[in-house]
Amino acid sequence: VFLAMGLLLLVTSGPAVAQVRQEQATLTVVVGNVEVLTGGTTAWRRATIGMRLAQGDEVRAAANAEAEMAMTDGSVMKVTAETRLQVRQLDADPTTRVRNSFFHLVAGRIRAGVAQVAVTLVQARQGGFVISTPTAVAAVRGSDGVVGYNPSTRVMTVMSFRGVWATMEVATQRFVFVAQ
């Protein structure tokens, strides 16, 4: 997965940066049994509105539960029922304006509403917005879509509502572009 993320990073972002600042996402909606595992800890705790998520944190939503998290660039991720999502990287360089958002979908489905500023940075190769699974990786080229992963079948699904998403199967390193 990390090889695939690295390959997509080469495709989606610009040169390496030195002044990187860690960013956070904020939970703006919590419905039902949603929990957060803070990076470096082993105990899940109940999620609350306003809770901040950073690199290394995980969110899981039980049956009939959901959560939304807002990033500082205005992008929004909706975590649906029976989903587990890891925050792998959230950072920005204020000098170069390079911004990277990387998530790993362990199971379930998320909807990513990517802010136009993030899409513009990706298109200018000044950032990346990537969602990986154990079998594939999806990089945002559009601004609205759903990514799902079923661990039983080991299948990743991608649906674009706006724009195009670039996906790559980890095993074959084959790219597929998913259009609206």
Image (cartoon, rainbow, N blue to C red):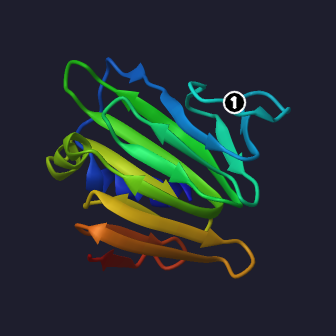
The residue indicated by pointer 1 is 39
- Residue at 25% x, 19% y: name it: 94
Front residue of 132/161: it is: 161
Image coords of residue 111 (percent x, y):
46, 59
Q: Is residue 154 above or below residue 115?
A: below
Left or right of 10, for residue 80: right
Q: Mark 1 belongs to which amino acid?
A: Gly
Q: Is residue 74 above or below residue 18?
A: below
Left or right of 67, for residue 120: left
| Residue 151 visible in rendering | yes
Image coords of residue 114 (percent x, y):
32, 49
- Residue at 35% x, 42% y: name it: 75
Left or right of 168, for residue 121: left
Front residue of 118/31: it is: 31
Front residue of 4/60: it is: 60
- Residue at 47% x, 61% y: name it: 4
